[in-house]
Every structure is written in C-alpha cells, then in structure tokens.
Image (cartoon, grey):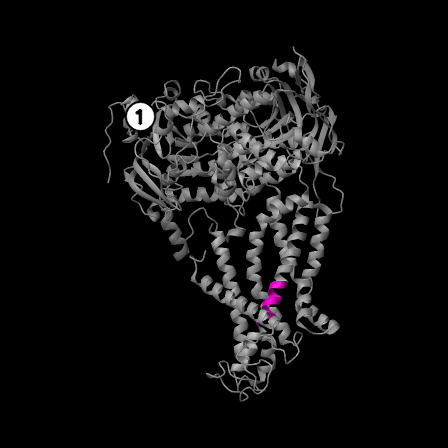
C-alpha cells in the first residue's frame, strides 16, 4: 500500500520514506522495542546522518531498511518503508533481493568481515560488477541464480571456468580497475590480486565502497563506516564518500555515534534516543538551534576546547532499560525541562520550522 | 614560569619486538618491529600529558614499557627521580605510585570476581593493609568516583560501561598513586558517559594532585584534558609542547594533518573536507629511511629520506623533529 | 540447567546412579557388609548358565555365579579409574598448560613439545607394556592411563589461558604486585576451569571405554574378581548359548559411556547458553 505524501509546492518527493516503523527484539529479559514508530525520509542526493548513542536503534534502522534484520529475534511490528512506490516491509526475502545490494547498498563497520577472506579483491569487485551488468541486460539477480543452477546458463561477462581458475575477463577487468581508481586506491592493478588481509583497514573500507557504488545504488547505507579507522584515514574515507555521492548521484544514510562526524559531512541529521527519533533538521540549524533537550545535552557534553576554556556539562543519569516499556517521553527522566505531560504521552515528531522537526512538548 | 618538577622521564627508550622467522624458536631474528624507537619525554608533576597518535605509532607500547609491563629493549625510565628499569627498583614499590586505567571496561575487570574484590586487589597486594583498612578504603574509593557502596558486592557483568570504567578508576587511585596512565579511558564509551568520566578525572586530579599520562587517538579529548601534548608517529616523537600552542599552531607536517583530520562538532568549520593527506601508516618492520613521515609529507626534500630528524627546540618548551619545520611557520 | 535437553537429564540421572552405586559398594566393602543379592565370587549359588529370572535378575554364568551381583560389585573399578584418571589429567594439564601460556618463550616451547611426545604414545601399547613389567591390576592400569591421558588437557588449558592472558585485568593484577603463580590461582584457573570441566565430563566416558578395553585384554583384574571389561572377555564364548553373559556387561559399559557423555553434553549446552 502506498501512502500519498503531502508535499509543499517547492519540495521534491523523497527517495525513501520510513513511516511509523516499529521493530521489536525478543530477548531474555523480555521484548525490547528497538524502534518505536520511527519516521524519517531521505531525499535524493543528500547525506543524512543518523546520530545516537549505543542502544538507540540506529543500527536496527539501517538493517530494517536493507532487509537484513535477523527475523527470529527481531520482528517488524508495524510501519512501512516506501522506496520507489514499493513498501519494502511487505516484500518477502526473495523479492527484497531485487533491491538489496543493487538499489540499496550497505557498508559495515568492520570491513574485514564484509569481504570474503579467501577470494582476491579483484574477484570480489568483478562479481559485483557482473551482477550489475546482468541487471542491465535484463536478468534479475534472483532469476539469474536460478538460471545458473538449473540451466547452467552463464551470464555474459562471466568466465565459464570453475571459480578457482577463473581469470577476470578483460572488459570486466577494466571496470574493476576503474572502480578502484574511483576510490583512490593506489596501484589498483596490483591490488586486484591481493587478498583482504593484505590491505589496511582504510583500503578495505574503500574496496567496500567501490563494491557498493559499482551497483550505482540509489541509496548507500553506511553503518559506522569509519569507527574502526584511524583519524586521518577516517577523514580520507569521509571525504571520499562525500565526493562520490555527487559523482554517482547516490544518497547516503550515515549511521554514527559521533555527532562531530555528522556535523562535518551530513546535509541533514536525525538524532535518535532509545528507539525514537527526537529531532531531524538540516545540519546547520541542528547545531545553531538545537530544539530537543537531548540534542542540546549532547552538544554541550562534547569536548570542544581546553579544560580551561570550556566546561563540560554531562547529561545526568543513563539510557533507560528498554526491556521495561516506558510510557511517555523516554528522555523524561533526564530532562531538565520535564513537564507533567512528558510522562503521560510520548510526543510526536512535529515540524516546528522549515525542515526542522522535533518530538518535544516544549515545541508544540 | 613556575619551577616544574618532572615526575617521569624517559631517556632514549626503545622497545623492539623480534619478528620470528620460520618455526625454529632458537633462530635469532634479524627483523624487528620498532614499536618505540628512541623516545625522550618528560612528564611534569601535577600536569596531564597527552600522548597522541594513530594505530602503530607506539603510544600504547610506550605506556606499557613505562609501566614495566614489558621490558625495554634499551633506554631508561626515570620515575620519581629513580631509574626503574632492569629491576633497579622493586615493582611493588613502583606500583604504589604508578597505576593504569585501561581502555576496555569489559576486560579490565575479572568477570568472576566482585567489584569490591577488584578494587581491593592492589590494596592487598601493594599496601600491606589490614582487611578492615582495605574495606574502608574500598568504600572511600567508590564514593570518590560517584558509585554507591553496595556496588562492591556486584559482579562486573551487572554494571554498565560507564560504571565499570568508574570502578577501574577507583581501583587505580586506591593506592594513592602519583602518576596514573590513562589508556584511552573513554574510547569505548558513549559521548554522554565520556563527559561524565572526563569530568571525574579532572576532579580527581585536582583533589589528589595527580599527574596523568593520557594515551589517546581522540584529539578533542586530548585537547580538553591535557596541558602538554606528545605526538607520536611510527615509534618516534615528532612534536611536543603545550597543548594549547600545538592546537593553535601545529608545526610538524604530521601533526598538522592529524589535527586537521579530527572532526569538529561544528558544521561551519568543515575542516575534514579540506584535509589533504595521502598514503597509509608505514610498516613497523621496514620503516621508510630517514624521516619516517617523508613519503607522505608535502614538504619533503631529498635529505628527508636520508637523515632522521632529531627533536629540536623551535621555541621555549616546543620541540619538533623535522628538517624543514620553518616551512610550516 | 537441564531444561534444555531431556537426554542430558536422563544421562545425568543414570550417571549419578552409577556414581552412587560405586560409592555404596565401596563403603559396603570397607564396612564388610554385603549388599548384593548373592556373593559375587561364590560359585554355584544357582544353576550354571541360567537365563535371567526372578531369582537371578541377570542370570548366572558358567560357574553358577550371579551376574547381577558381579556387575554391581565391579562398578567401583570403572568409576574409580575414570574419575581418577580424568582428575589427574585435569590437574596436570591445567597447570602445565597455564604455566606454558603465561611464561611463554622457551619454557612454553619445551613444555608443549614434551606434551606432544606423550601425546604420541599409544594408550593400549603403553598399558600392555606396563602390564607386562609391573603385572596386571586395576591400580597399575590406572597409573598407565594417568601417564598418557593429560596432553589434550594441556592443549586446551594453554589455549584458554592464552585467551585470558591478554585481558586487561591480568595486567591490572600485575600492577597490584601479584606474581604469576598468584595470578594463575586467583584469576586464570577460575576462568578456564569451566571449559576444562566440560571437556573432562565428556572424557569420563572415554576413559571407561578404554579401561574396559584394557580389562578385556586381561590386563586389569585377575579372576575371580569381577570387572565389566573382563566379563565381556571371559564370557564371549557364550555369545550364542548364553548371550546374557557377554551382552549385559557390554551393555552396562555402553550405558556408562553414554550416560557420562550425555551429562557432559548437557552441562556444555547449559553453560554455553548462558
């Protein structure tokens, strides 16, 4: 079922809309609501940063959008994810494969476990490019796998030799080297013969970006892509992602716990707390006019100078245990402005200014 | 400038790890990982020295060698005015004044032992106090770090990351040390918890006149907490000076790249996208000849690949190891 | 703990029963009290080669001895040997493995190569050699097995100890002035004992089997002392004519092995689920 969005005349339809998504996890202490009626949208060609601390549900959101939630413990209770006039939540796992990796791609925090350690880098990128070629030629990725198994049909561009002996065909090799050059990997013609463990963390992450972007996806989800990298490498990779976003015309959903990273590269930011989105805004307004008390708290507890010049104001208390259901606003117990209505009913995300939404009774 | 007393000094400290060739355990290795490659540093009493650098720079090995958890390959460590390497001072005496708070709250406490037992461990082992004195000290330490007394009977698994880190701090300050090495004390914590721990560390430093050696790759935390900064690259010290001065005007080309790569939480100051650093951290077994940073340095000239630069004082209290430091003035 | 698997529960009950039986028999023996329906070595308490009946629940053997009594009295042999061997192997293996892991270097190499040498010795051949030199007997077989049973425990203990050795709390213990020995006792053993105990429980069944094999070969008891393995050997000629004679002892051996294996499985599943 497709929902019609009310747009202002100057607004463009978003690329992907998450609407009232609720995801539960069955855990030993009880069911945990990892996402509680979460709504957000991502426009075309923009970088949306989703910022939150551990347990806020940001990774669950990313996995839900690409259909990689581990479904026995996790369960999508409610909600929709609209992408190109299809509700991804309603698609079964088979149909979701049409989108995953092709129109919606994802890169993870630890590239060592995302790359297959026993295949060379070149082969893995070639596989990604081959899939794209097959899509272009009209094979759906699902059909082609079945075709390969049953009719022994080999898609164009793929060598007929058994996997171990297969050399990348010439025209694919060109594209593989081109994709490595795109992500600024030095000596690409040597790198294609290397194995993942021979590369550094930063290089592996670039390879992941190359593989993801070779599909020319409409949306690239990056779940903490630079958390495991050194500071200078992080800067290089983030800069690269931002440049490529414009070149390849992709949108990026960047999940991070580091608000500073979001400030540096995001166009818009969504702040999450304990399974809720508490504020979304373009990055400049979020920084200069943070509306939600949690956002304000987060900004004032970041060290931004010497101890002699600034005073850190930590947020008192700690994140609530999500196993006990909470009535009302989840931030209420730590909020300096808590009112009576805060503990009675959870505030909805409301647009307070142009493109600045907040879920707080202080603002409507 | 008031007279400053050094609580810790290292003199040409080196720690090399032999790389084993083949399966013969008796073969003498010819290759070494030069984790710490001749470090001279001073930590002034009552101050915080941040040792910053990225993976492979040797800062963790430096800390562990200073704390005598590994034996130095050569060089000297002078703590409280006395040399402590090569068994010249008994470790039990050293550890009464030198403690470490580790990075990972998950692995710094034995999961099978109660919190109170963990905090009491250094007190029993180093101070030779009676059980009663130790129990009182444990209670006091918990108070000081802002935890309730009854947490002493719990197991670490029942605590949050922030609470565990507080316990680790309580354990470290129990013996009333003079120097505490903080090894990435907040890297595994959320931002809001990090702020709590940083504030706690500052309070404790004032209250007990502690000296801190802060090992971190997080420039923002280093800037906030430290008075002096030591920048390391591939086992060498490349820059040293007062933190405020270095943050305002870094002089070594690596320091410039490092500081400009640190993300600032301000969308109007998008330093990250201006960063221009190429290449990767070099191999620790086969480092580049001469200055280890030269393959990545925009100012490198031929001498940089031939001669290793030494630390030179370019202004009072400011040391930089670079042949062409005037280029970054 | 046993919520997860019924088999483990059944195994546990049977294993417990066997242990209890061994204890009871040993105590009765010490007190000089007979608890079996008949005297196990007395011949002709019933007609020879009588099939199982109400009088003789497991029948009688070729010399008219009651099989059930013999089976009961033989229980402590297998139980004592398996518990003792596993216990000693656990102790030796834990200490050697942990010391090797923590000291590292040449000591580690030396200890592990020594372990490899012992590991290479075949159990049965060594047992036979000991049986020939020292003479047969339950104690001698126990010693033979103790000599060669500990290497897998060493390997396991060393692996587990290595995992623990790099934890920060071990370094914190050093910073508390603790020496290696105290660290091992206070921190390391507690962490690694669980894994080792699980392996040991599963191992009990294996020792029962190997010991039964040795006593089948005649290296253990001398008749008329009863022993499960020995019974299988001396009754095997009656497989067709009086099948209960070799089959029942063999079945009891298998039961013991299965019971302890299931118990070990159950413990492992319960602890891994935690």
Q: Magenta stretch?
A: C75-84
Q: Mark 1 — residue?
A: A360
Task: Judge the density around disc 1: few (<14), some (14-19), many (≥20) Cα neighbours within 10 Å.
Answer: many
Q: Which residue sits at x=69%, y=74%?
A: C136
Q: Give how far across and how far down residue B130 sits, in percent.
A: 63, 36
Camera-nearest residue between C153 and A224: C153
Query: Observer-nearest residue: B106 or C175?
Result: C175
Residue C32, how many percent across, how many down?
Answer: 60, 74
Seen in the picture, residue A84 relative to A153 is either above or below; the reply is above
Is residue A305 among what the camera can see?
yes
User: What secondary structure is marked by label 1?
Assistant: loop
Q: Nearer the viewer, residue A72 or A341?
A: A341
What residue is drawn where x is 69% and y is 53%?
C112
Secondary structure mostly taken by the magenta-highlighted segment of the chain: helix
User: Where does residue C244 sit, x and y in percent of width and height?
Assistant: 51, 82
Total numbered labels: 1
Decide: is C81 above or below A185: below
- Front residue of C233 and B156: B156
Q: Is residue A91 left or right of residue C240?
A: left
| Extreme-bottom residue of the structure | C47
């Amino acid at each position: 079922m497709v929902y019609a969005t009310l747009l202002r005349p100057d607004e463009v339809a978003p690329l992907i809309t998450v609407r009232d998504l609720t995801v539960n996890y069955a855990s030993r202490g009880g069911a945990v609501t990892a996402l509680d009626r979460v709504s957000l949208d991502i426009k075309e060609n923009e970088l949306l940063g989703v910022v939150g601390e551990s347990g806020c549900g940001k990774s669950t959101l990313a996995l839900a959008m690409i259909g990689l939630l581990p479904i026995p413990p996790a369960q999508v209770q409610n909600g929709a994810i609209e992408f190109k006039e299809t509700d991804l939540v309603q698609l079964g796992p088979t149909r979701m494969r049409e989108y995953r990796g092709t129109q919606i791609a994802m890169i993870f925090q630890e590239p060592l476990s995302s790359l297959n350690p026993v295949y060379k880098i070149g082969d893995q990128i070639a596989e990604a490019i081959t899939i794209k070629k097959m899509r272009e030629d009209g094979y759906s990725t699902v059909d082609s796998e079945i075709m390969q198994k049953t009719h022994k049909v080999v898609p164009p561009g793929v060598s007929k030799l058994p996997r171990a002996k297969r050399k990348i065909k010439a025209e694919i090799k060109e594209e593989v080297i081109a994709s490595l050059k795109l992500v600024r990997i030095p000596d690409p013609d040597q790198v294609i013969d290397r194995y993942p463990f021979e590369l550094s963390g930063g290089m592996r992450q670039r390879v992941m970006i190359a593989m993801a972007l070779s599909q020319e996806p409409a949306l690239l989800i990056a779940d903490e892509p630079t958390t495991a990298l050194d500071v200078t490498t992080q800067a290089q990779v983030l800069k690269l992602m931002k440049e490529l976003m414009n070149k390849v015309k992709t949108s990026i959903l960047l999940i991070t716990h580091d608000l500073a990273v979001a400030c540096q590269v995001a166009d818009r930011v969504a702040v999450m707390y304990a399974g809720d989105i508490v504020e979304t805004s373009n990055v400049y307004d979020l920084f200069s006019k943070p509306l939600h008390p949690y956002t304000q708290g987060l900004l004032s507890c970041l060290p931004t100078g010497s101890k002699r010049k600034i005073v850190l104001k930590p947020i008192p208390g700690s994140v609530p245990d999500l196993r006990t259901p909470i009535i009302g606003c989840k931030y209420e117990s730590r909020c300096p402005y808590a009112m009576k209505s805060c503990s009675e009913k959870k505030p909805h995300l409301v647009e307070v200014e142009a493109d600045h939404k907040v879920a707080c009774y202080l603002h409507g | 400038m008031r007279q400053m007393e050094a609580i810790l000094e290292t003199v040409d400290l080196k720690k090399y790890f032999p790389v084993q060739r083949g399966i013969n355990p008796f073969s003498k290795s010819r290759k070494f990982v030069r984790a710490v490659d001749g470090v001279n540093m001073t930590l002034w009493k009552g101050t915080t020295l941040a040792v910053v650098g990225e993976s492979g720079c040797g800062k963790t090995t430096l800390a562990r060698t200073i704390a005598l958890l590994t034996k130095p390959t050569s060089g000297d460590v002078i703590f409280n005015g006395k040399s402590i390497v090569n068994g010249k001072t008994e470790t039990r005496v050293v550890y009464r004044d030198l403690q470490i708070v580790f990075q990972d709250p998950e692995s710094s406490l034995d999961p099978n032992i109660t919190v109170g037992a963990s905090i009491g461990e250094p007190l029993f082992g180093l101070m030779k106090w009676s059980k009663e004195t130790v129990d009182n000290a444990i209670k006091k330490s918990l108070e000081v770090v802002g935890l309730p007394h009854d947490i002493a009977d719990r197991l670490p698994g029942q605590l949050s990351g922030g609470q565990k880190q507080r316990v680790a701090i309580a354990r470290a300050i129990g013996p009333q040390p003079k120097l505490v090495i903080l090894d990435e004390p907040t890297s595994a914590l959320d931002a809001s918890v990090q702020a709590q721990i940083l504030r706690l560390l500052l309070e404790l430093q004032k209250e007990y006149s502690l000296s801190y050696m802060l090992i971190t790759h997080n420039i923002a935390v280093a800037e906030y907490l430290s008075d002096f900064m030591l920048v390391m690259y591939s086992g060498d010290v490349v820059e040293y000076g007062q933190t405020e001065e270095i943050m305002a005007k870094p002089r070594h080309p690596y320091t410039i790249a490092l500081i400009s790569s640190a993300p600032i939480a301000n969308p109007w100051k998008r330093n990250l996208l201006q960063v221009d650093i190429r290449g990767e951290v070099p191999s620790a077994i086969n480092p580049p000849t001469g200055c280890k940073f030269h393959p990545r340095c925009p100012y490198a000239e031929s001498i940089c690949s031939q001669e290793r630069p030494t630390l030179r004082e370019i202004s009072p209290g400011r040391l930089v190891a670079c042949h062409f430091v005037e280029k970054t003035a | 703990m046993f919520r997860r698997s019924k088999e483990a529960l059944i195994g546990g009950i049977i294993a417990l029963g066997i242990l209890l039986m061994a204890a009871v028999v040993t105590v009765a023996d010490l007190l000089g009290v007979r608890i079996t329906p008949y005297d196990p070595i007395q011949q002709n308490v019933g007609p020879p080669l009588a099939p199982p009946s109400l009088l003789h629940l497991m029948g009688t053997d070729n010399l008219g001895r009651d099989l059930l009594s013999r089976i009961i009295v033989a229980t402590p042999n297998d139980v004592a040997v398996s518990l003792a061997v596993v216990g000693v192997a656990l102790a030796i293996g834990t200490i050697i493995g942990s010391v090797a892991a923590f000291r590292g270097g040449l000591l580690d190499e030396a200890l592990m190569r020594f372990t490899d040498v012992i590991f290479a010795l075949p159990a049965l051949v060594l047992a036979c050699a000991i049986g020939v030199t020292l003479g047969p007997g339950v104690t001698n077989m126990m010693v033979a097995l103790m000599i060669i049973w500990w290497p897998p425990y060493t390997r396991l203990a060393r692996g587990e100890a290595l995992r623990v050795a790099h934890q920060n709390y071990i370094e914190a213990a050093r910073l508390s002035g603790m020496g290696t020995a105290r660290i091992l006792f206070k921190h390391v053993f507690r962490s690694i004992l669980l894994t080792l105990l699980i392996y040991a429980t599963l191992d009990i069944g294996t020792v029962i089997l190997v010991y039964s094999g040795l006593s089948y070969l005649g290296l253990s008891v001398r008749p008329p002392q009863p022993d499960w393995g020995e019974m299988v050997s001396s009754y095997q000629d009656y497989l067709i004519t009086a099948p209960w004679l070799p089959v029942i002892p063999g079945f009891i051996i298998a039961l013991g092995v299965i019971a302890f294996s299931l118990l070990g499985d159950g413990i492992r599943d319960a602890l891994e689920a935690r």
